[in-house]
Amino acid sequence: MEQLTKEQFIKDFKAQLHTDYLVDNNEATAEEHFRTLGKLIKRYVMSDWLRRRDEIVKEQKKTAYYFSIEFLPGKMLQTNLLNLGIYDLVTEALADINVDLTVLVEAERDMALGNGGLGRLASCFMDSLPTIGAPGFGNGIRYKYGLFKQRIVNGYQVELPDAWLPSEGSVWETKKPHSAVDVKIYGSVYLAPQEDGALKPIYENVKTLHAVPYDVIQIGFNNGVVNNLRLWDVELPEKYELDYQTLADRRRVEDITSFLYPDDSSRDGQAMRLIQEYFMVSAGLQTIVASYAKMQLPMAKIHEKVAVHINDTHPAMAVPELMRILMDDYGVKWDDAWATTTQVMSYTNHTVLSEALEKWDTGLFKEIVPRIHQIIGEIDRKFVKEWAGKVDTGIIDRTRIVQNNQIHMANLAIIGGHSVNGVAKLHTELLIEDVLKEFYVLFPEKFNNKTNGIAQRRWSQIANPGMSALLDDLIGKGWRSNIHELSELEELLTRSDVQTSFYQVKQANKQKLADYVKKTLDIDLPIDAIFDVQVKRLHAYKRQLLNVMHIIKLYQDLKDDPGLEMTPRVFIFGAKAAPGYHFAKSVIKIINELANLINYDTSLNDKLKVVFLENYNVSLAELIVPAADVSEQISTAGKEASGTSNMKFMMNGALTLATLDGANIEIKDAVGEDNIVIFGMDKDAVYAHYDKHDYNSRAIYDSDPTIKRVVDAFIDGTIPNTHYEGHEIWDALISYNDEYFLLEDFTDYAEKQAYISELYQDKPIWQAKVIKNIANSGRFSSDDTIEGYAKDIWGII
Ligand code: 475
């Protein structure tokens, strides 16, 4: 954008306010101020946006499209101001006319079109792609409702709709009706032989969905690059009114873009989800192929200009859909279409949990996307033929796409692409050795690792202005554009004035969080306590329950001996449970009841507090992460693909308490063993139990009185109002043999927690470790991660 002065900005702001709302500055609401500023930002970047678009077309740049069923950007106002380089100018200019930027920030609603890690990662990538100047665009769905809003009522999770989208639309998006495309579902299709011998698909009784794109600006950091996140909405134009004659029919169509499936552990069995997936994939690909066609280059070489990324399996229909478009719409022959399709496509796996690997009944495919069903059948047939005789038939049987009347989406994505990546070193190794090992036999060259990263500007400069100002003082402002300069802190680890400054910043951030907790829950948190935080989706493998067991132990210790010397602790949880995930919801209830029990027990003398913050989302994370002293990353080794909050916490000066799982291992490598606290079984120990079938939680329970007492607290009335949930948990741990090995890891976990309590007392040592963590966090920048994708997988830079 062009150089902006404060005077010019104020003039623009007032004029925009007049035009849109017919109000003067002093009468406008926060919402009106926010939207006005958003519109101005869009106006300021418009020339960059258009220039960028023209450049890509003119120079025929190869472009990557990141297909994802989820994006979780949170709020965009501060990021956009920062990336545009006008954050300070706008803050000051607004203050001059008595407008407080923080009030405007509050007025923006979180855009929560994602469940958790996978969606948040997609949004970090949307920030990093323009920042590294790469032509990379997002493609997703414009859900009217984001992930549910969580309320806690009587300790239980209650899910409310998250109506994030104002009736006027998001201020960051631009509707593009002229770029709409039609997506066909249902009906039947047969192949009619043509004079030249080709087979032409003839469709009958299809239903047509009108897909309308909304383009959301993605601004690069201080570089004049503006990319695009394209979100598709469905509409019912008059042209197709006969397809949908009743109100119920129309509603069903409108529902396609109504809500995100609030499940990050297993697929919801509904046809609607399948339609969502196809809708997004088909609309995106039709547009991409049409714009490639304008270049007048051979269709069979589309991979030279286009890369499509399949983020988890949800967009895996991109493979057969691109085949369909190339063959049916552009007359490309199968072999040529297949050769180019496999070079266009690449796939990221985000989880080793087998229940999260999507499988669909062939019957549903046949009904909803009959042509895609045909093409998948043909891909599968050719795959089997190609490998027959070359490898063991068992391998073919287990890697083929169609098995027992089910379509395996991961298999489709792997067979139909040229790259498969995991999201941390250990995770990729596990894919190769275990989860996808038979694919590795067939296609070793496709496998590669891309360790996750985080958009460091949001997770440092925006979330933690106090620390950012301190960093400016200590090492200059260079780190703001080159995060690797944080390593200059290595020289300062032991300087006591530096340590004190970081400590003061942390205490101020803790106070801010404590104020929020006071306001929302009316609980007083002592900020001299260790703030020990676990925020992430609620899942058995993430082991929030292990954390709970440790809290119970501390509680029991304090009740036994009220005079016990103990570093005060505040345990903070934030977690949404999938609405159908019974066990996870029981854990939430237990945490809340335990919190009630502990927080109001004056005999504990404020040594222990427990808070469950409702509705954990990106904005709340921006408040919590900078306030943490301890980052809990305690999944069963081998289960957490990567984790990304672990990176955010370290960047904000928390010490990680972790198992050797996911990216925790790379954090350990970055900071050294002395600056992270590791406990529990590693992946090999876990796998040894799987192999030998020798784990016996009851034996541990019977032989260890401390553990027995903790586990029995779930059923002996210690925690009020949890009769039902307590038994469910006791059974999971003892009757059902503790699938995630909490009991085996408990003792080491509790010991390492005690070590942390001791360590915290020694401020110079603790602070040196804190600073060491910040100094080494630069390598987890998503700018670097996305550069890896852009170079190695997509070939766009
Ligand atoms: C991993 N979500 C983290 C993060 O790579 C990792 C699954 C099915 C349906 C809807 N959502 C999902 C996930 O699988 C998910 O979020 N996975 C997470 O991806 C980014 O850091 O370890 O659990």
Image: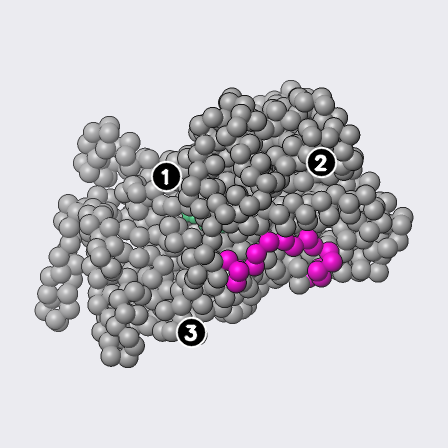
Circle 3 residues within 10 Å: few <14, some 14–19, many ≥20: some
Say which residue appears at 53% left-offset and 68% top-offset: 791
The alpha-carbon separation of the residues under discs 1 and 3 comes to 38 Å
The alpha-carbon separation of the residues under discs 3 and 2 comes to 48 Å
Q: Is residue 676 magenta?
A: yes
Q: Position of residue 19 (x, y in %)?
A: 57, 29
- Pick the front one: 448 or 37: 448
Q: What's the residue type where badge 1 is placed? A: Thr
- Pick the front one: 669 or 606: 606
Location of mark 2 (residue): 569
Q: Quadrant of residue 109?
A: top right
Location of mark 3 (residue): 444
Q: From where the camera sits, is residue 59 visible?
A: no
Q: Dot 1 lies on which element?
A: helix
Instruction: Residue lying at the far top in this picture: please name it.
Output: 27
Q: Dot 3 lies on which element?
A: helix
Q: Is residue 639 magenta?
A: no
Q: What's the residue type where badge 3 is placed? A: Pro
Number of marks present in the image shown: 3
Is the residue under label 2 in contact with that under label 1 (CB below 8 Å)? no
Q: Which residues are magenta?
A: 670-686
Q: Is residue 130 above or below residue 791?
A: above
Location of mark 1 (residue): 257
- Pick the front one: 312 or 231: 312
The residue at label 3 has a CB less than 8 Å from ligand 1: no
Judge left or right: residue 490 versus residue 69: right
Please tell me which of labels 1 and 3 falls first in the chain.
Answer: 1
Label 1 or label 3, whichever lies nearer to me, is: 3
Q: Which mark is residue 549?
A: none
Judge left or right: residue 163 versus residue 616: left
Say which residue appears at 48% left-offset and 62% top-offset: 688
